[in-house]
């Protein structure tokens, strides 16, 4: 029974993180799939979302400002809004740049965001990062929540205490996973509607032939900024969810500007850019490959360690993690060459509706 | 005047800025040539710099352990350059060439992927931790010190800085000879200006592309070796750290303009170091933590105000 719970909990956490990456991939799909904007600074926007959420929702603490202890939904919305605002400012300046230049500029922006998070110790606690980020559902069992407003109406703190004590300690995991999957579904539905709407068709027109769209009287720059901002807001949301999942974030390791960005790109390109189903499928597929390869390599190394008993495999273990990255990178190259449109290619909505 | 103001400025801000600028300049040459001739931003360039430095370190260590005498990094760099150029040509053949006629963005993405592949490869072979390149503190060159001191203008310059500046100067001279006097160099400039026109006038573009990788690879490894000579340690993330300033230098000088890239590199290097000089009051003008943001700021200003760069580079 315990083993069964263990396996299903592993599956749930796989779905949780896969779902967060799916949100990131959907955000990128708006920018790249819909509008053709090469954003190489995904980690930067996710970091903005994560830090906004963390600073607004954590309990007050002596190490840095923030820690306002605000309600979680408000903090999530703020994360989206701030991420969008930053994208808007960047868009005003950089959106006209050609794809490569935009990629360089967005890499730079992600670096600047990282520098800011690392150096503004008073606000962000610098390289040490922020911990004890509340996680939805699980946070209900924190004292500061069940002693305050809506929860304290139902029962007093002793009552809540005994209620949470009788639950298994993983009770929140399925709920958190469900929340994320619901979010993925909502964003998916919204984006599908957007793609079929006149706005979405106009975005495709701009992406395919900017000159013609411009000549037809479409405001190319404004539409591009819109796509960039909406995509960044979705990424900010994903960042906020990621910070909840991790509970501890720091500027360098959590938001490694290249690794995280890169993984999301592989997901979108593998799944099929321009297709929201493809983005979600690619996210889960790559995430499962990524996690499964870790287990395979580790158990393989373990077996190897058993066979060659007088050898320390811990060194090999850390190295193998990087080898995994090489494999994923080569996988991207293979997909780029063999399936340039992804596993589920983009399907154009017909004029008759669906 | 010298004691109160110049000594500190020249020795602790200007010379380090010049050294960093030389490194950026060498790296930016490769980026600007690839950008001009192959028409895409090669994100893997910084990683080739990094792997070149790791090859150099390996050659030095092997020689030291195998033959028992230390060799100068610049000697060890020769086989490393050959290896890095082979890597460049291999990557081009199998990962970039299939996209020659596809939209640019695909090859940019491929290079973005190669960036991670090369870095992760280095991390899995040499390990993710820092390695010491040359141990100990670099002492200033005594001759330069006493010579300049006799004019009351003491300059503290370790040998490594001398090597870096002189080496960059020599490479620059060789490059200018190559680009203006040889057939292949003229071909490179022709393809950079107009690939179609170059093709109809009988230039073999594939050979020019190979030459571009050779020149770019040479400069990249030189830059990487100079960088680790300056830092005295190797890090797997240093290639990525250099990428942004090098792009900034290439854009500042104008895409496809190698000499523009050199000027751009020197300007960016000096700007980064001088931005932390206490120009106003006692504290540094810009908090040192934000030093790397300077290159980015210059790049954005250039892209918005004058995207063709200082020397009228190509615009895509």
Image: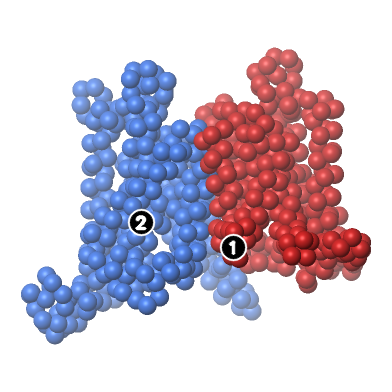
Q: Is residue B4 above or below residue A206?
A: below
Q: Which mark is residue A211?
A: none
Q: Which residue is mark 2?
A: A49
Q: Is residue A312 above or below residue B165?
A: below
Q: Is residue B265 above or below residue A353?
A: below
Q: Which mark is residue B281?
A: 1
Which chain comes out blue in the rendered image? A
Is there any visible trace of residue B276 in the rendered image?
no
Q: Where is residue A48 drawn, in percent x and y?
A: 39, 56
Query: Closer to the camera: disc 2 or disc 1?
Result: 1
Q: Nearer the viewer, residue B272 or B61?
A: B272
Side of B168 relative to A234 (left or right): right
Q: In the picture, which quadrant includes the C terminus of chain B?
A: top right
Q: Quadrant of residue A136?
A: bottom left
Tell me what residue is drawn at x 29 percent, y 73 percent: A59
* Subunit under mark 1: B
Q: Please, which colouring scheme is shown?
A: by chain
Q: Nearer the viewer, residue A122 or B150?
A: B150
Q: Where is residue A72 drawn, in percent x and y?
A: 24, 63
Q: Where is residue B45 drawn, in percent x and y?
A: 65, 45
Tell me what residue is drawn at x 83 percent, y 56 percent: B162
């Amino acid at each position: 029974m315990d083993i069964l719970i263990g396996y299903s909990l592993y599956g749930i956490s796989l779905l949780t993180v896969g779902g967060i990456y799916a949100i990131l991939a959907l955000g990128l799909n708006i920018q790249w799939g819909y509008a053709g904007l090469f954003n190489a600074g995904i980690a930067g926007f996710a970091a903005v979302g994560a830090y906004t959420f963390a600073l607004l929702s954590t309990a007050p603490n002596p190490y840095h400002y923030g820690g306002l202890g605000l309600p979680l939904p408000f903090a999530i919305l703020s994360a989206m809004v701030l991420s969008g605002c930053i994208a808007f400012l960047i868009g005003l300046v950089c959106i006209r740049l050609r794809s490569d230049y935009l990629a360089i500029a967005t890499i730079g922006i992600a670096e600047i965001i990282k520098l800011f998070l690392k150096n503004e110790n008073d606000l962000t606690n610098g390289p040490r990062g922020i911990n004890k980020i509340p996680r939805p559902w699980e946070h209900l069992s924190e004292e500061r929540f069940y002693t305050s407003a809506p929860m304290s109406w139902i029962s007093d703190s002793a009552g809540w205490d005994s209620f949470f004590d009788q639950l298994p300690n993983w009770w929140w995991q399925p709920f958190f996973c469900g929340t994320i999957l619901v979010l993925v579904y909502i964003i998916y539905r919204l984006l599908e509607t957007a793609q079929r709407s006149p706005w979405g068709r106009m975005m495709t027109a701009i992406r395919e032939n900017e000159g013609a769209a411009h000549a037809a009287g479409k405001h190319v720059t404004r539409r591009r900024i819109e796509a960039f901002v909406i995509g960044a807001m979705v990424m900010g949301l994903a960042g906020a969810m990621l910070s909840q999942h991790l509970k501890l974030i720091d500027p360098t390791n959590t938001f490694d500007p290249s690794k995280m960005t890169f993984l999301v790109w592989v997901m979108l390109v593998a799944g099929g850019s321009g297709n929201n189903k493809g983005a979600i499928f690619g996210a889960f597929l790559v995430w499962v490959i990524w996690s499964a390869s870790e287990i395979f390599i580790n158990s393989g190394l373990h077996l190897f360690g058993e066979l060659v008993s007088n050898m320390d495999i811990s060194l090999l273990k850390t190295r193998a993690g990087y080898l995994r990255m090489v494999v994923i990178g080569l996988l991207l190259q293979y997909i780029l060459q063999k399936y340039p449109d992804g596993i589920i290619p983009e399907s154009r909505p017909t004029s008759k509706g669906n | 005047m010298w004691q109160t103001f110049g000594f500190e400025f020249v020795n602790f801000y200007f010379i380090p800025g010049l050294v960093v600028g030389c490194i950026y300049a060498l790296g930016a040459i490769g980026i600007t040539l690839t950008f001009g001739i192959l028409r895409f931003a090669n994100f893997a360039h910084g990683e080739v710099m990094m792997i070149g430095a790791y090859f150099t370190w390996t050659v030095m260590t092997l020689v030291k352990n195998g033959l028992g005498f230390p060799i100068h990094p610049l000697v060890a760099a020769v086989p490393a350059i050959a290896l890095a150029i082979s890597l460049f040509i291999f990557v081009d053949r199998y990962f970039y060439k299939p996209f020659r006629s596809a939209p640019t963005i695909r090859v940019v993405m491929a290079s973005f992927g190669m960036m991670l592949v090369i870095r992760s490869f280095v991390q899995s072979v040499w390990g993710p931790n820092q390695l010491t390149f040359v141990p100990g503190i670099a002492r200033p060159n005594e001759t330069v010190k006493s010579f300049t001191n006799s004019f009351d203008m003491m300059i503290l310059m370790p040998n490594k800085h001398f090597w870096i500046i002189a080496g960059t100067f020599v490479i620059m001279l060789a490059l200018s000879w190559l680009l203006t006097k040889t057939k292949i160099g003229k071909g490179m400039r022709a393809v950079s200006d107009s690939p179609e026109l170059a093709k109809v006038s009988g230039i073999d573009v594939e050979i020019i592309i190979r030459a571009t990788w050779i020149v770019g690879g040479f400069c990249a490894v030189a830059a990487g070796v100079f960088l680790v000579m300056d830092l005295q340690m190797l890090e797997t993330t240093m290639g990525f750290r250099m990428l942004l300033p090098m792009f900034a230098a290439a854009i500042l000088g104008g895409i496809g303009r190698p000499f523009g890239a050199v000027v751009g590199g020197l300007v960016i290097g000096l700007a980064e170091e001088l931005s932390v000089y206490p120009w106003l009051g006692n504290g540094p003008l810009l908090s040192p933590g934000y030093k790397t943001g300077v290159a980015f700021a210059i790049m954005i200003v250039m892209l918005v105000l004058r995207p063709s760069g200082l020397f009228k580079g190509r615009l895509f």
